[in-house]
Amino acid sequence: MLEDSIKTQLRDVLGRLTRPVAVTAFVDDSQGSEEMRALLRDVASASSLVELHEQREGEGRTPSFGIHSPGEEPRVIFAGLPLGHELTSLILALLHVGGYPPKVSAEALEQIARLDGELRFETYFSQSCQNCPDVVQALNLMAAKNPRVRHVAVDGALFRGEVEQRKVMAVPTVFLNGEPFGQGRMELAQILAKLDDGSSVKRRVEALDQRKPFDMLIVGGGPAGASAAIYAARKGLDTGIVAERFGGQVMDTLAIENLISVVETDGPKLAAALEQHVRAYPVELIKHERVESITPGSPFELRLASGATLRAKSVVLATGARWRDMNVPGEAEYRTKGVTYCPHCDGPLFKGKRVAVIGGGNSGVEAAIDLAGVVGHVTLLEIAPALRADAVLVRKLKSMPNVEIITRARTTEVVGDGQKVVGLRWAHTETKEQNQIEVEGVFVQIGLLPNTRFIKGTVELNGLGEVVVNDRGQTSVPGLFAAGDMTTTPFKQIVVALGDGAKAALGAFEHLIRATAPAD
Protein backbone atom coordinates (compact mmCIF):
# COMPACT_ATOMS: atom_id res chain seq x y z
CA MET A 1 0.00 0.00 0.00
CA LEU A 2 2.60 2.55 1.08
CA GLU A 3 5.72 3.30 -0.93
CA ASP A 4 9.03 2.15 0.53
CA SER A 5 10.19 5.73 1.13
CA ILE A 6 7.04 6.48 3.14
CA LYS A 7 7.46 3.25 5.11
CA THR A 8 10.98 4.33 6.04
CA GLN A 9 9.73 7.74 7.18
CA LEU A 10 6.91 6.07 9.10
CA ARG A 11 9.35 3.86 11.02
CA ASP A 12 11.36 6.93 11.99
CA VAL A 13 8.30 8.87 13.11
CA LEU A 14 6.71 6.01 15.06
CA GLY A 15 9.99 5.58 16.89
CA ARG A 16 8.70 8.49 19.02
CA LEU A 17 5.91 6.37 20.53
CA THR A 18 6.28 5.98 24.29
CA ARG A 19 3.52 3.45 24.96
CA PRO A 20 1.57 0.72 23.10
CA VAL A 21 -1.10 1.70 20.60
CA ALA A 22 -3.92 -0.61 19.50
CA VAL A 23 -5.38 -0.32 16.02
CA THR A 24 -8.70 -2.12 15.66
CA ALA A 25 -9.99 -2.57 12.13
CA PHE A 26 -13.69 -3.16 11.40
CA VAL A 27 -13.72 -4.96 8.07
CA ASP A 28 -15.72 -7.15 5.69
CA ASP A 29 -14.91 -8.77 2.35
CA SER A 30 -15.05 -5.58 0.29
CA GLN A 31 -12.24 -4.09 -1.77
CA GLY A 32 -12.18 -1.11 0.57
CA SER A 33 -11.57 -3.39 3.55
CA GLU A 34 -8.74 -5.14 1.74
CA GLU A 35 -7.08 -1.81 0.96
CA MET A 36 -7.47 -0.80 4.59
CA ARG A 37 -5.89 -4.06 5.75
CA ALA A 38 -2.89 -3.38 3.51
CA LEU A 39 -2.49 0.15 4.87
CA LEU A 40 -2.79 -0.91 8.51
CA ARG A 41 -0.38 -3.80 8.07
CA ASP A 42 2.20 -1.33 6.77
CA VAL A 43 1.52 0.88 9.80
CA ALA A 44 1.80 -2.00 12.28
CA SER A 45 5.03 -3.23 10.72
CA ALA A 46 6.60 0.20 11.32
CA SER A 47 6.64 -0.14 15.12
CA SER A 48 6.60 -2.95 17.65
CA LEU A 49 4.39 -0.76 19.85
CA VAL A 50 1.52 -0.83 17.32
CA GLU A 51 -0.85 -3.80 17.71
CA LEU A 52 -3.29 -4.55 14.86
CA HIS A 53 -6.60 -6.34 15.49
CA GLU A 54 -9.54 -7.11 13.20
CA GLN A 55 -13.25 -7.33 13.94
CA ARG A 56 -16.23 -8.09 11.75
CA GLU A 57 -18.47 -5.68 13.64
CA GLY A 58 -17.63 -2.30 14.96
CA GLU A 59 -18.62 1.33 15.24
CA GLY A 60 -21.21 1.18 12.46
CA ARG A 61 -19.21 2.00 9.34
CA THR A 62 -17.24 -0.57 7.37
CA PRO A 63 -14.42 -0.35 6.54
CA SER A 64 -13.18 1.72 9.48
CA PHE A 65 -10.59 1.51 12.22
CA GLY A 66 -10.01 2.93 15.66
CA ILE A 67 -6.76 4.05 17.29
CA HIS A 68 -6.71 3.61 21.06
CA SER A 69 -4.77 2.49 24.10
CA PRO A 70 -4.98 -1.28 24.76
CA GLY A 71 -7.99 -2.11 26.91
CA GLU A 72 -9.86 1.09 26.04
CA GLU A 73 -12.67 1.69 23.56
CA PRO A 74 -11.62 3.56 20.41
CA ARG A 75 -12.28 7.30 20.50
CA VAL A 76 -10.20 8.25 17.44
CA ILE A 77 -11.77 6.55 14.42
CA PHE A 78 -11.23 6.74 10.66
CA ALA A 79 -14.04 5.55 8.39
CA GLY A 80 -12.32 4.98 5.06
CA LEU A 81 -8.74 5.37 3.98
CA PRO A 82 -6.90 8.41 5.41
CA LEU A 83 -4.61 8.90 2.43
CA GLY A 84 -3.74 11.98 0.43
CA HIS A 85 -3.80 15.03 2.69
CA GLU A 86 -5.13 12.88 5.56
CA LEU A 87 -2.11 10.56 5.84
CA THR A 88 -0.55 13.07 8.21
CA SER A 89 -3.73 12.96 10.31
CA LEU A 90 -3.31 9.19 10.70
CA ILE A 91 0.32 9.52 11.77
CA LEU A 92 -0.43 12.27 14.28
CA ALA A 93 -3.30 10.25 15.75
CA LEU A 94 -0.94 7.33 16.35
CA LEU A 95 1.60 9.63 18.00
CA HIS A 96 -0.89 11.40 20.25
CA VAL A 97 -2.55 8.19 21.43
CA GLY A 98 0.92 6.69 21.82
CA GLY A 99 2.13 9.33 24.27
CA TYR A 100 4.04 11.74 22.03
CA PRO A 101 3.34 15.30 23.25
CA PRO A 102 1.33 17.38 20.78
CA LYS A 103 2.71 20.69 19.53
CA VAL A 104 -0.03 22.83 21.07
CA SER A 105 0.00 25.24 23.98
CA ALA A 106 -0.51 24.19 27.57
CA GLU A 107 -3.55 26.50 27.60
CA ALA A 108 -5.13 24.56 24.72
CA LEU A 109 -4.50 21.22 26.45
CA GLU A 110 -6.07 22.61 29.60
CA GLN A 111 -9.13 23.71 27.61
CA ILE A 112 -9.43 20.22 26.11
CA ALA A 113 -9.22 18.62 29.55
CA ARG A 114 -11.97 20.93 30.87
CA LEU A 115 -14.48 19.92 28.18
CA ASP A 116 -17.46 18.32 29.90
CA GLY A 117 -20.33 16.17 28.73
CA GLU A 118 -20.32 13.54 25.99
CA LEU A 119 -19.05 15.09 22.76
CA ARG A 120 -19.49 12.87 19.68
CA PHE A 121 -17.93 14.48 16.60
CA GLU A 122 -18.17 13.30 12.99
CA THR A 123 -16.15 14.99 10.24
CA TYR A 124 -16.71 14.37 6.53
CA PHE A 125 -13.51 14.85 4.54
CA SER A 126 -12.07 14.20 1.10
CA GLN A 127 -8.53 13.01 0.49
CA SER A 128 -7.89 15.94 -1.86
CA CYS A 129 -9.11 18.61 0.59
CA GLN A 130 -6.26 20.75 1.89
CA ASN A 131 -8.47 22.32 4.58
CA CYS A 132 -9.79 19.08 6.07
CA PRO A 133 -6.62 17.93 7.94
CA ASP A 134 -6.70 20.91 10.30
CA VAL A 135 -10.19 19.94 11.44
CA VAL A 136 -9.55 16.20 11.55
CA GLN A 137 -6.28 16.58 13.47
CA ALA A 138 -7.77 19.02 16.00
CA LEU A 139 -10.73 16.76 16.79
CA ASN A 140 -8.52 13.66 16.88
CA LEU A 141 -6.30 15.37 19.43
CA MET A 142 -9.30 16.32 21.53
CA ALA A 143 -10.51 12.70 21.48
CA ALA A 144 -7.05 11.38 22.33
CA LYS A 145 -6.70 13.69 25.34
CA ASN A 146 -10.24 13.72 26.76
CA PRO A 147 -12.15 10.45 27.43
CA ARG A 148 -15.47 12.29 27.01
CA VAL A 149 -14.70 13.18 23.38
CA ARG A 150 -15.08 10.81 20.41
CA HIS A 151 -14.28 11.63 16.81
CA VAL A 152 -15.00 9.78 13.57
CA ALA A 153 -13.36 11.07 10.39
CA VAL A 154 -15.48 9.89 7.44
CA ASP A 155 -14.24 9.73 3.85
CA GLY A 156 -17.17 11.30 2.01
CA ALA A 157 -16.20 9.73 -1.31
CA LEU A 158 -16.41 6.22 0.17
CA PHE A 159 -19.59 6.66 2.20
CA ARG A 160 -21.57 8.40 -0.53
CA GLY A 161 -24.99 7.19 0.64
CA GLU A 162 -24.39 8.68 4.05
CA VAL A 163 -23.17 11.93 2.53
CA GLU A 164 -26.30 12.25 0.41
CA GLN A 165 -28.59 11.33 3.30
CA ARG A 166 -27.07 14.03 5.52
CA LYS A 167 -26.90 16.48 2.61
CA VAL A 168 -23.16 17.02 2.91
CA MET A 169 -22.08 18.96 -0.18
CA ALA A 170 -18.88 20.62 1.04
CA VAL A 171 -15.96 19.47 3.15
CA PRO A 172 -14.94 19.56 5.87
CA THR A 173 -18.39 19.31 7.45
CA VAL A 174 -18.58 18.55 11.18
CA PHE A 175 -21.48 17.18 13.21
CA LEU A 176 -21.60 17.22 17.01
CA ASN A 177 -23.93 14.73 18.68
CA GLY A 178 -25.77 14.35 15.39
CA GLU A 179 -26.32 18.07 14.78
CA PRO A 180 -24.39 20.40 12.40
CA PHE A 181 -21.45 21.98 14.22
CA GLY A 182 -19.28 23.66 11.59
CA GLN A 183 -18.15 23.72 8.00
CA GLY A 184 -14.90 24.75 6.39
CA ARG A 185 -11.40 25.02 7.74
CA MET A 186 -11.16 25.33 11.52
CA GLU A 187 -8.10 25.15 13.73
CA LEU A 188 -8.04 23.78 17.28
CA ALA A 189 -8.40 27.20 18.89
CA GLN A 190 -11.50 27.98 16.83
CA ILE A 191 -13.16 24.67 17.72
CA LEU A 192 -12.40 25.14 21.40
CA ALA A 193 -13.75 28.69 21.24
CA LYS A 194 -17.07 27.37 19.88
CA LEU A 195 -17.25 24.94 22.80
CA ASP A 196 -16.05 27.41 25.42
CA ASP A 197 -18.31 28.74 28.15
CA GLY A 198 -16.92 32.23 27.58
CA SER A 199 -14.26 32.27 30.29
CA SER A 200 -11.32 31.64 27.94
CA VAL A 201 -12.49 34.32 25.52
CA LYS A 202 -12.82 36.79 28.37
CA ARG A 203 -9.27 36.09 29.58
CA ARG A 204 -7.94 36.49 26.02
CA VAL A 205 -9.71 39.83 25.54
CA GLU A 206 -8.36 41.14 28.83
CA ALA A 207 -4.80 40.11 27.91
CA LEU A 208 -5.01 41.79 24.49
CA ASP A 209 -6.48 44.97 25.98
CA GLN A 210 -3.54 45.24 28.38
CA ARG A 211 -0.90 44.70 25.70
CA LYS A 212 1.37 47.73 25.19
CA PRO A 213 1.27 49.40 21.74
CA PHE A 214 3.17 47.61 18.98
CA ASP A 215 5.71 49.48 16.91
CA MET A 216 4.15 47.85 13.86
CA LEU A 217 1.01 45.72 13.67
CA ILE A 218 0.21 43.78 10.51
CA VAL A 219 -3.43 42.95 9.78
CA GLY A 220 -3.58 39.73 7.74
CA GLY A 221 -1.52 36.57 7.66
CA GLY A 222 -1.09 35.84 3.97
CA PRO A 223 2.09 36.25 1.90
CA ALA A 224 2.03 40.06 2.13
CA GLY A 225 1.43 40.03 5.87
CA ALA A 226 4.11 37.43 6.54
CA SER A 227 6.64 39.33 4.44
CA ALA A 228 5.84 42.60 6.20
CA ALA A 229 6.23 40.99 9.64
CA ILE A 230 9.63 39.50 8.78
CA TYR A 231 10.97 42.80 7.45
CA ALA A 232 9.63 44.72 10.45
CA ALA A 233 11.10 42.25 12.94
CA ARG A 234 14.47 42.39 11.19
CA LYS A 235 14.46 46.13 11.78
CA GLY A 236 14.17 45.46 15.50
CA LEU A 237 10.57 46.66 15.77
CA ASP A 238 8.07 45.29 18.28
CA THR A 239 5.96 43.50 15.68
CA GLY A 240 2.65 41.66 15.70
CA ILE A 241 0.31 39.96 13.24
CA VAL A 242 -3.43 39.75 13.80
CA ALA A 243 -5.26 37.42 11.40
CA GLU A 244 -8.32 35.20 11.20
CA ARG A 245 -6.19 32.45 9.70
CA PHE A 246 -2.52 32.33 8.85
CA GLY A 247 -1.87 31.80 5.15
CA GLY A 248 -4.95 33.65 3.98
CA GLN A 249 -6.31 32.64 0.60
CA VAL A 250 -3.08 30.76 -0.14
CA MET A 251 -4.60 27.98 2.00
CA ASP A 252 -7.23 27.49 -0.74
CA THR A 253 -4.65 27.15 -3.52
CA LEU A 254 -3.53 23.68 -4.55
CA ALA A 255 -0.80 23.85 -7.19
CA ILE A 256 1.71 26.73 -7.07
CA GLU A 257 4.23 26.59 -9.90
CA ASN A 258 5.14 30.25 -10.46
CA LEU A 259 6.79 31.21 -7.15
CA ILE A 260 10.31 32.00 -8.28
CA SER A 261 12.97 29.52 -7.04
CA VAL A 262 10.27 27.11 -5.83
CA VAL A 263 9.55 24.77 -8.74
CA GLU A 264 6.35 23.38 -7.26
CA THR A 265 4.46 23.56 -3.98
CA ASP A 266 0.88 23.87 -2.73
CA GLY A 267 -0.97 26.39 -0.61
CA PRO A 268 -0.93 24.64 2.77
CA LYS A 269 2.78 23.87 2.44
CA LEU A 270 3.58 27.45 1.53
CA ALA A 271 1.43 28.79 4.37
CA ALA A 272 3.21 26.50 6.84
CA ALA A 273 6.58 27.64 5.53
CA LEU A 274 5.55 31.30 5.83
CA GLU A 275 4.43 30.80 9.43
CA GLN A 276 7.62 28.91 10.29
CA HIS A 277 9.68 31.77 8.85
CA VAL A 278 7.71 34.38 10.78
CA ARG A 279 8.08 32.41 14.02
CA ALA A 280 11.85 32.44 13.53
CA TYR A 281 11.64 36.11 14.55
CA PRO A 282 10.18 37.71 17.71
CA VAL A 283 6.79 38.34 16.09
CA GLU A 284 3.63 38.04 18.18
CA LEU A 285 0.99 36.05 16.28
CA ILE A 286 -2.60 36.82 17.25
CA LYS A 287 -4.59 34.24 15.31
CA HIS A 288 -8.33 33.69 14.90
CA GLU A 289 -9.10 37.37 15.44
CA ARG A 290 -10.80 39.71 12.96
CA VAL A 291 -10.22 43.46 12.90
CA GLU A 292 -13.56 45.26 12.67
CA SER A 293 -12.39 48.88 12.65
CA ILE A 294 -9.27 51.05 12.83
CA THR A 295 -9.17 54.44 14.49
CA PRO A 296 -6.23 56.57 13.32
CA GLY A 297 -4.24 58.29 16.01
CA SER A 298 -1.09 58.11 18.04
CA PRO A 299 -1.28 55.21 18.55
CA PHE A 300 -3.74 53.61 16.13
CA GLU A 301 -6.52 51.64 17.83
CA LEU A 302 -7.72 48.42 16.23
CA ARG A 303 -11.04 47.07 17.46
CA LEU A 304 -11.39 43.26 17.16
CA ALA A 305 -14.55 41.22 16.70
CA SER A 306 -13.91 39.58 20.09
CA GLY A 307 -14.22 42.99 21.76
CA ALA A 308 -10.51 43.46 22.41
CA THR A 309 -8.58 46.56 21.35
CA LEU A 310 -4.99 46.53 20.08
CA ARG A 311 -2.78 49.60 19.71
CA ALA A 312 0.11 50.29 17.36
CA LYS A 313 2.37 53.16 16.29
CA SER A 314 2.10 52.04 12.66
CA VAL A 315 -0.15 49.57 10.82
CA VAL A 316 0.27 47.51 7.65
CA LEU A 317 -2.98 46.25 6.13
CA ALA A 318 -2.67 42.95 4.26
CA THR A 319 -6.11 41.33 4.40
CA GLY A 320 -6.03 40.09 0.81
CA ALA A 321 -9.15 39.22 -1.14
CA ARG A 322 -12.02 36.75 -1.18
CA TRP A 323 -13.86 34.83 -3.88
CA ARG A 324 -16.20 36.95 -5.95
CA ASP A 325 -19.86 35.90 -5.88
CA MET A 326 -22.00 35.68 -9.03
CA ASN A 327 -24.81 37.60 -7.26
CA VAL A 328 -27.56 35.68 -9.04
CA PRO A 329 -30.73 34.15 -7.61
CA GLY A 330 -30.12 30.82 -5.90
CA GLU A 331 -26.39 31.31 -5.28
CA ALA A 332 -26.66 32.25 -1.61
CA GLU A 333 -29.52 29.84 -0.97
CA TYR A 334 -27.57 26.85 -2.28
CA ARG A 335 -24.10 27.74 -1.02
CA THR A 336 -22.59 24.50 0.40
CA LYS A 337 -25.61 22.69 -1.08
CA GLY A 338 -24.07 22.44 -4.52
CA VAL A 339 -22.64 25.96 -4.94
CA THR A 340 -18.98 25.88 -3.93
CA TYR A 341 -15.73 27.75 -4.48
CA CYS A 342 -13.13 25.01 -3.88
CA PRO A 343 -12.89 22.29 -6.55
CA HIS A 344 -10.01 20.55 -4.78
CA CYS A 345 -11.93 20.21 -1.52
CA ASP A 346 -15.43 19.44 -2.73
CA GLY A 347 -14.80 17.81 -6.12
CA PRO A 348 -14.79 14.22 -4.77
CA LEU A 349 -18.32 14.72 -3.40
CA PHE A 350 -19.53 15.07 -7.00
CA LYS A 351 -17.92 11.90 -8.35
CA GLY A 352 -19.70 10.74 -11.48
CA LYS A 353 -22.08 13.73 -11.48
CA ARG A 354 -22.59 16.66 -13.81
CA VAL A 355 -21.15 20.00 -12.66
CA ALA A 356 -20.60 23.51 -14.00
CA VAL A 357 -17.58 25.76 -13.60
CA ILE A 358 -18.19 29.49 -13.87
CA GLY A 359 -15.18 31.43 -15.18
CA GLY A 360 -12.73 31.03 -18.04
CA GLY A 361 -9.59 32.48 -16.46
CA ASN A 362 -6.74 30.40 -15.11
CA SER A 363 -8.64 29.50 -11.93
CA GLY A 364 -11.73 28.38 -13.80
CA VAL A 365 -9.89 26.36 -16.42
CA GLU A 366 -7.67 24.71 -13.80
CA ALA A 367 -10.77 23.85 -11.78
CA ALA A 368 -12.45 22.30 -14.83
CA ILE A 369 -9.35 20.23 -15.61
CA ASP A 370 -9.15 18.92 -12.04
CA LEU A 371 -12.87 18.16 -11.87
CA ALA A 372 -12.91 16.38 -15.24
CA GLY A 373 -10.83 13.60 -13.70
CA VAL A 374 -13.41 13.05 -10.95
CA VAL A 375 -16.92 14.00 -12.04
CA GLY A 376 -19.00 12.64 -14.88
CA HIS A 377 -19.20 15.81 -16.96
CA VAL A 378 -18.02 19.43 -16.71
CA THR A 379 -19.61 22.41 -18.40
CA LEU A 380 -17.42 25.53 -18.29
CA LEU A 381 -19.24 28.84 -18.82
CA GLU A 382 -17.34 32.02 -19.68
CA ILE A 383 -19.02 35.39 -20.20
CA ALA A 384 -16.35 36.63 -22.68
CA PRO A 385 -16.10 35.54 -26.33
CA ALA A 386 -13.07 33.35 -25.54
CA LEU A 387 -11.36 31.74 -22.57
CA ARG A 388 -8.87 34.01 -20.82
CA ALA A 389 -6.62 31.33 -19.33
CA ASP A 390 -3.03 30.56 -20.36
CA ALA A 391 -2.82 28.78 -23.70
CA VAL A 392 -1.27 25.63 -22.20
CA LEU A 393 -4.24 25.27 -19.84
CA VAL A 394 -6.79 25.86 -22.61
CA ARG A 395 -5.19 23.17 -24.77
CA LYS A 396 -5.30 20.71 -21.91
CA LEU A 397 -8.95 21.48 -21.18
CA LYS A 398 -10.00 21.08 -24.81
CA SER A 399 -8.33 17.68 -24.95
CA MET A 400 -10.60 16.26 -22.23
CA PRO A 401 -13.57 14.28 -23.58
CA ASN A 402 -16.04 15.00 -20.76
CA VAL A 403 -15.77 18.80 -20.89
CA GLU A 404 -18.04 21.24 -22.72
CA ILE A 405 -16.99 24.90 -23.11
CA ILE A 406 -19.65 27.57 -23.56
CA THR A 407 -18.54 31.16 -24.19
CA ARG A 408 -20.64 34.32 -24.25
CA ALA A 409 -22.62 32.77 -21.40
CA ARG A 410 -23.93 34.94 -18.57
CA THR A 411 -25.11 32.92 -15.57
CA THR A 412 -28.57 34.12 -14.53
CA GLU A 413 -29.76 31.68 -11.84
CA VAL A 414 -28.79 28.65 -9.78
CA VAL A 415 -31.71 26.24 -9.81
CA GLY A 416 -32.49 24.01 -6.85
CA ASP A 417 -35.19 21.74 -5.50
CA GLY A 418 -35.23 23.33 -2.05
CA GLN A 419 -32.44 21.14 -0.71
CA LYS A 420 -29.72 21.01 -3.36
CA VAL A 421 -28.65 22.31 -6.77
CA VAL A 422 -30.32 20.65 -9.75
CA GLY A 423 -29.49 23.03 -12.58
CA LEU A 424 -28.14 26.32 -13.88
CA ARG A 425 -29.72 28.96 -16.12
CA TRP A 426 -27.66 31.12 -18.45
CA ALA A 427 -28.24 33.64 -21.25
CA HIS A 428 -26.23 34.20 -24.42
CA THR A 429 -24.65 37.66 -24.15
CA GLU A 430 -25.44 38.56 -27.80
CA THR A 431 -28.63 36.73 -28.77
CA LYS A 432 -30.10 36.89 -25.22
CA GLU A 433 -31.30 33.32 -25.72
CA GLN A 434 -32.16 31.65 -22.40
CA ASN A 435 -30.75 28.21 -21.64
CA GLN A 436 -30.75 25.73 -18.78
CA ILE A 437 -28.41 22.82 -18.04
CA GLU A 438 -28.83 20.05 -15.51
CA VAL A 439 -26.00 20.02 -12.96
CA GLU A 440 -25.63 19.03 -9.32
CA GLY A 441 -22.66 21.24 -8.56
CA VAL A 442 -21.66 24.81 -9.44
CA PHE A 443 -18.02 25.78 -8.90
CA VAL A 444 -17.61 29.58 -8.96
CA GLN A 445 -14.22 30.83 -10.19
CA ILE A 446 -14.75 34.42 -11.36
CA GLY A 447 -12.07 36.34 -9.57
CA LEU A 448 -11.58 38.13 -6.27
CA LEU A 449 -12.89 41.04 -4.22
CA PRO A 450 -10.61 42.98 -1.83
CA ASN A 451 -11.27 42.52 1.89
CA THR A 452 -11.61 46.22 2.64
CA ARG A 453 -15.13 46.70 4.00
CA PHE A 454 -13.80 47.16 7.54
CA ILE A 455 -11.81 50.26 6.54
CA LYS A 456 -14.33 51.90 4.24
CA GLY A 457 -14.47 55.54 5.23
CA THR A 458 -11.09 55.36 6.98
CA VAL A 459 -8.75 55.29 3.97
CA GLU A 460 -9.14 56.18 0.31
CA LEU A 461 -10.49 53.31 -1.83
CA ASN A 462 -10.82 53.18 -5.61
CA GLY A 463 -13.95 52.18 -7.51
CA LEU A 464 -13.12 48.49 -7.10
CA GLY A 465 -12.86 48.82 -3.34
CA GLU A 466 -9.06 48.53 -3.36
CA VAL A 467 -6.92 50.57 -0.99
CA VAL A 468 -5.12 53.34 -2.88
CA VAL A 469 -1.38 53.21 -2.11
CA ASN A 470 1.73 54.96 -3.37
CA ASP A 471 5.04 53.36 -4.36
CA ARG A 472 5.89 52.78 -0.68
CA GLY A 473 2.58 51.25 0.29
CA GLN A 474 1.44 54.42 2.08
CA THR A 475 -2.31 54.95 2.21
CA SER A 476 -4.14 58.25 2.52
CA VAL A 477 -3.70 58.05 6.32
CA PRO A 478 -0.15 58.78 7.63
CA GLY A 479 1.31 55.75 9.36
CA LEU A 480 -1.23 53.38 7.80
CA PHE A 481 0.24 51.24 5.02
CA ALA A 482 -1.22 48.47 2.87
CA ALA A 483 0.07 45.63 0.72
CA GLY A 484 -1.02 42.75 -1.49
CA ASP A 485 -4.31 41.85 -3.15
CA MET A 486 -6.37 44.41 -1.18
CA THR A 487 -4.50 47.33 -2.78
CA THR A 488 -4.28 49.07 -6.13
CA THR A 489 -1.00 47.25 -6.84
CA PRO A 490 -1.57 45.49 -10.19
CA PHE A 491 -1.21 41.76 -10.79
CA LYS A 492 -2.62 39.74 -7.87
CA GLN A 493 0.11 37.13 -7.55
CA ILE A 494 1.83 35.51 -4.54
CA VAL A 495 5.25 36.71 -5.62
CA VAL A 496 3.93 40.27 -6.03
CA ALA A 497 2.29 40.15 -2.59
CA LEU A 498 5.55 39.02 -0.98
CA GLY A 499 7.40 42.00 -2.42
CA ASP A 500 4.51 44.31 -1.64
CA GLY A 501 4.59 43.31 2.04
CA ALA A 502 8.30 43.97 2.31
CA LYS A 503 7.87 47.35 0.62
CA ALA A 504 5.04 48.40 2.94
CA ALA A 505 6.99 47.36 6.06
CA LEU A 506 10.01 49.33 4.92
CA GLY A 507 7.79 52.30 4.15
CA ALA A 508 6.26 52.09 7.62
CA PHE A 509 9.72 51.83 9.16
CA GLU A 510 10.76 55.04 7.39
CA HIS A 511 7.60 56.70 8.68
CA LEU A 512 8.42 55.69 12.26
CA ILE A 513 11.96 57.06 11.95
CA ARG A 514 10.67 60.41 10.71
CA ALA A 515 7.94 60.52 13.35
CA THR A 516 10.42 59.98 16.18
CA ALA A 517 13.28 62.08 14.81
CA PRO A 518 14.20 65.04 17.07
CA ALA A 519 13.17 68.45 15.81
CA ASP A 520 15.89 70.73 14.41
Image (cartoon, helix red, strand yellow):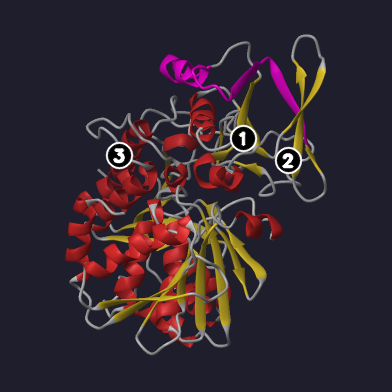
Q: Specify the amino acid type for callout 1.
A: Val
The span from disc 3 to disc 1 (Cα, nearest Å) is 32 Å
Give the amino acid type for the residue marked by disc 3 in the picture.
Ala
Q: For residue 414, what is the image quadrant? A: top right
Q: Quadrant of the C terminus?
A: top left
Residue receiving disc 1: 444
Q: Report if residue 311 is visible in the image.
A: no
Tell me residue 22's x, y (percent): 34, 79
Q: Residue 97: x, y in percent?
A: 34, 78
Q: Is residue 455 left or right of residue 15?
A: right
Give the structural element (helix, strand or loop) at label 1: strand
Mark earlier in primary sequence (1, 2): 2
Between discs 3 and 2, the one toward the N terminus: 2
Label 3: few (<14), some (14–19) or many (≥20) C-alpha neighbours in 10 Å: many
Q: Is residue 403 within the magenta segment?
A: yes
* Residue occupied by mark 3: 502
Q: Would residue 439 be visible to someone looking at this image?
A: yes
- Mark number, residue 331: 2
Tell me the SS state at disc 3: helix
The answer to whether residue 121 is left or right of residue 169 is left
In the image, 182 versus 485, the foreground residue is 182
* Residue at x-position 65% and y-position 56%: 161
Q: Looking at the image, is 131 positioned above or below residue 179?
A: above
